[in-house]
Amino acid sequence: MSSDSVQLCLSRKTGEMLQRLRANRPLVHCITNEVVQEITADVLLAAGASPAMVVGEGEAEYFAGIASALSVNVGTPYEARIETMKKAIRGALAAGKPWVLDPVAAGGIPWRDKIIFELLEMHPTAVRGNASEIRFLAGVGTGGKGVDSLDDSSSAIEAAKALARKYKTFVVVTGHKDYATDGERVLCAVGGSEMMTLVVGTGCSLSALLAAFLGGAERSLEACIACCDYVNYANDTASTRSSGPGSFHVQYLDALYQIRSEDFRK
């Protein structure tokens, strides 16, 4: 893809989106994997959203209808959880609420892949994944190494566009650079450090934060890339204040909380 067909995110717009998210304090219904529940809740709270981990089959569909947005993460799937996911998605769709799919480790196991493609057919508002996951879902890659990507994010731009067109959704590819597309336009956010990859759950929590932006700011491609821009800024800030993964974890949450909308207008 030529460089002039990718538009860099405007930081001022990110600040406006963040301000709206915090004013609305969206309630985000998270059905995520057991490994990342705490950091996901912490990230949402630090950003100004309100997390809820509602996973009961009897209440998920109803709750998704009253939440501002739904985030579905397939990191640790099992039969009962899959049914809960589908019920919650149906509840969100019936209420006209946005929902985000995080296709963790797509391309790794056929049983998991079948589930992911079934969820894709339920019309997610956005799909957020790494380059290997997105390339596999678009039919041009074989997946990554477990949850880790083996491809650079820029190599997944065309795959992301194709996936967005096929399922009529926003597709967000995160990595060294972050890209968001609706199948035609491509927006890019830059920044961040490799330290982010050394803390479990930063990618999964980003998907939940994406749901917060879509439910609390606006349902747009700009909201998708604004979420990435905000996270990159927090990542950069935390990296300068930390000496390793442990201190980065703490500093990342602090940065998400301390960053103000005005910081993006400088």
Image (spheres, rainbow, N blue to C red):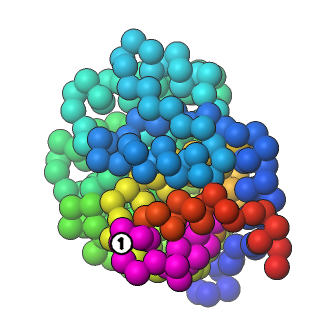
Residue 168 drawn in magenta: no
Q: Is residue 217 above or below residue 54?
A: below
Residue occupying the point 32% across, 24% down: 83
Q: Position of residue 185 (x, y in %)?
A: 66, 67
The answer to whether residue 116 of the structure is visible from this angle is: no
Residue occupying the point 75% across, 63% down: 260
Side of 252 relative to 182 (left or right)? left
As drawn, the residue found furthest toward the top would be 58
Side of 221 relative to 105 (left or right)? right
Q: Is residue 143 above or below residue 86?
A: below
Give the magenta-colored segment's residue range: 230-248
Looking at the rendering, which quadrant does residue 55 occupy? top left
The answer to whether residue 87 of the structure is visible from this angle is: yes
Kind of element beneath mark 1: helix
Residue occupying the point 43% across, 40% down: 72
Mark 1 lies on residue: 245
Quadrant holding the C terminus: bottom right
Q: Amino acid at mark 1?
A: Pro
